[in-house]
Image (tube, rainbow, N blue to C red):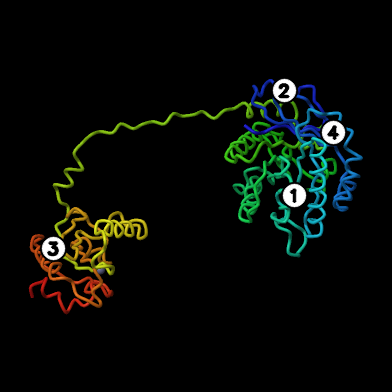
């Protein structure tokens, strides 16, 4: 599974965590600490204070010099890092700020690439822009198209943050899994979806009464046992649900749970105990149930139904096809009618019982006991055969051969009533019946 830790220091139980993941750990994210674990992609973030970070992004491309002056030494020292995170949670609530964001990141991504370094950019809350504070028309996700294109071009990663309010599963993805809405907006706008790392996930609710947690309340304030104590097993259940959902989206490469920290973010704390439970989720593999082939009993029920002849129609309803009387290839023409009835009308079979071509040939296209749509009235469908003469008899009449064959057929079927389609429902079908119908009914 794709879960991992969000480290703000390197805890002494990190190796134990890695071992417990049984080789399944794919990524690890570190802020100012960059563990080097074999076979694991390290995502590194050099922490730059929010105000300074925002000021640099607000300079557009010109801000990249200032950013690299702060971070480049660290980048050089930790050569094993797979991708370096850019500025964190720049708020994209206006088009002006979005333009700065794009200019900064396009320059940052290409400068880093020239130095042989991969970037992880964005690091924005998926709630953006719907949870914005302003009433202006907001920049929607496609507004960062140029940043995404630069990432795709340089094999970079996009990072998104999302938290559930009190429970990750609240709203069935209205909060966590919101990234899918954002991705759908990109796809609708024709933006190529990059690899995505969920850089911060978990539970979070803003509350002024928690100054130690930057006015936020994490999982330890929301997931509690009956004694009111933080309940790791309950949180792990939510994380496992989330991990299962991430598996469905190939573009997601990982998700780091905020946070392993020993100086702040008390109510968000991922300690050794919780981390071992997370490792068990990482190592967990869904049980693959082999497909069961149910036994098929060979029987003659289908033949029996045939013999029972569950309906005995007493009527024939005469139709015209409304198309050509002498198609080049009659069988292909009939197949086209069948295709239209099944694919376009969603009927289970072609509507008619028989079709008669201009030379008087009769094509039986259904079994007599098959009730099919053709008359526009289901009671009539049940008690009638639909017989269709090829042609459009609004402007000309059936051939003598068609009329003779049709008359022969209704006699064979032993029906008591032969009616034109237009006598069942309002329709022009089968054309000028009054001119030739009596030749079939014999009246
Ligand atoms: Zn008809």
Q: Are marks 1 and 3 in contact (CB under 8 Å)?
A: no
Question: Counting residues from the N terminus, which is met first, the one under dot 4 or under dot 3?
Answer: 4
State how far apart marks 1 and 2 are (Cα). Answer: 30 Å
User: Of callouts 1 and 3, which one flags the residue occurring earlier in the amino acid sequence?
Assistant: 1
Image depth: mark 2 or mark 3 in front: 2
The Cα atoms of the two marked residues, 4 and 2, are separated by 19 Å
> Does the residue at mark 1 contact the one at mark 4 (Cβ under 8 Å)?
no
* Among the two numbered marks 2 and 3 on one chain, the one whose residue lies closer to the N terminus: 2
Under tag 4, what secondary structure?
Answer: helix
Write down which quadrant ligand 1 falls in.
Answer: bottom left
Q: Quadrant of the C terminus?
A: bottom left
Q: Earlier in the sequence, mark 1 or mark 2?
A: 2
Residue 391 shown left or right of residue 48 in the figure: left
Residue marked by disc 1 = 147
Residue 331 versus residue 79 in the image, above or below: below
Say if disc 3 is inside 8 Å of ligand 1: no
């Amino acid at each position: 599974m794709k879960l991992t830790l969000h480290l703000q220091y390197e805890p002494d139980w990190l190796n134990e965590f890695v071992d417990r993941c049984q080789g399944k750990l794919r990524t690890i994210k570190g802020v100012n600490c960059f563990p080097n674990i074999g076979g694991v992609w390290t995502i590194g973030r050099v922490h730059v204070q929010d105000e300074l970070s925002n000021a640099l992004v607000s300079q557009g491309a010109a801000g990249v010099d200032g950013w690299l002056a702060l971070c480049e030494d660290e980048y050089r020292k930790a050569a094993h890092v797979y991708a370096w995170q850019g500025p964190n949670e720049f708020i994209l609530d206006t088009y002006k700020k979005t333009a700065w964001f794009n200019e900064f990141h396009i320059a940052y991504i290409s400068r880093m690439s020239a130095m042989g370094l991969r970037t992880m950019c964005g690091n924005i809350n998926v709630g953006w822009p719907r949870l914005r504070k302003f009433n202006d028309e907001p920049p929607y996700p496609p507004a960062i198209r140029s940043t995404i294109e630069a990432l795709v071009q340089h094999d970079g990663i996009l990072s998104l943050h999302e938290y559930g309010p009190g429970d990750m599963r609240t709203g069935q993805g209205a909060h966590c899994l919101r990234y899918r809405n954002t991705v759908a907006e990109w796809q609708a706008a024709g933006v190529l979806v990059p690899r995505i790392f969920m850089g911060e996930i978990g539970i979070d609710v803003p509350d002024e009464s928690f100054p130690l947690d930057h006015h936020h309340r994490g999982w330890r304030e929301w997931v509690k046992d009956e004694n009111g104590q933080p309940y790791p097993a309950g949180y792990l259940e939510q994380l496992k649900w989330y991990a299962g959902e991430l598996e469905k989206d190939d573009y997601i490469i990982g998700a780091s749970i905020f946070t392993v920290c020993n100086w702040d973010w008390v109510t968000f704390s991922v300690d050794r105990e919780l981390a071992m439970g997370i490792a068990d989720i990482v190592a967990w593999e869904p049980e693959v149930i082999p497909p069961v082939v149910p036994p098929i009993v060979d029987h003659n029920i289908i033949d029996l139904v045939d013999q029972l002849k569950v309906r005995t129609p007493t009527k024939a309803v005469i139709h015209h096809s409304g198309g050509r009387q002498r198609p080049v290839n009659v069988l292909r023409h009939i197949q086209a009618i069948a295709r239209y009835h099944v694919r376009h009308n969603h009927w289970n079979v072609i509507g008619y019982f028989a079709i008669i071509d201009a030379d008087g040939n009769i094509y039986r296209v259904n079994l007599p006991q098959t009730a099919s749509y053709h008359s526009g009235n289901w009671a009539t469908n049940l008690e009638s055969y639909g017989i269709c003469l090829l042609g459009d008899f609004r402007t000309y009449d059936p051939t003598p051969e068609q009329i003779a064959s049709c008359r022969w057929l209704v006699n064979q079927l032993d029906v008591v009533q032969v009616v034109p389609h237009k006598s069942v429902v309002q329709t022009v079908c089968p054309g000028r019946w009054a001119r030739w119908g009596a030749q079939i009914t014999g009246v």
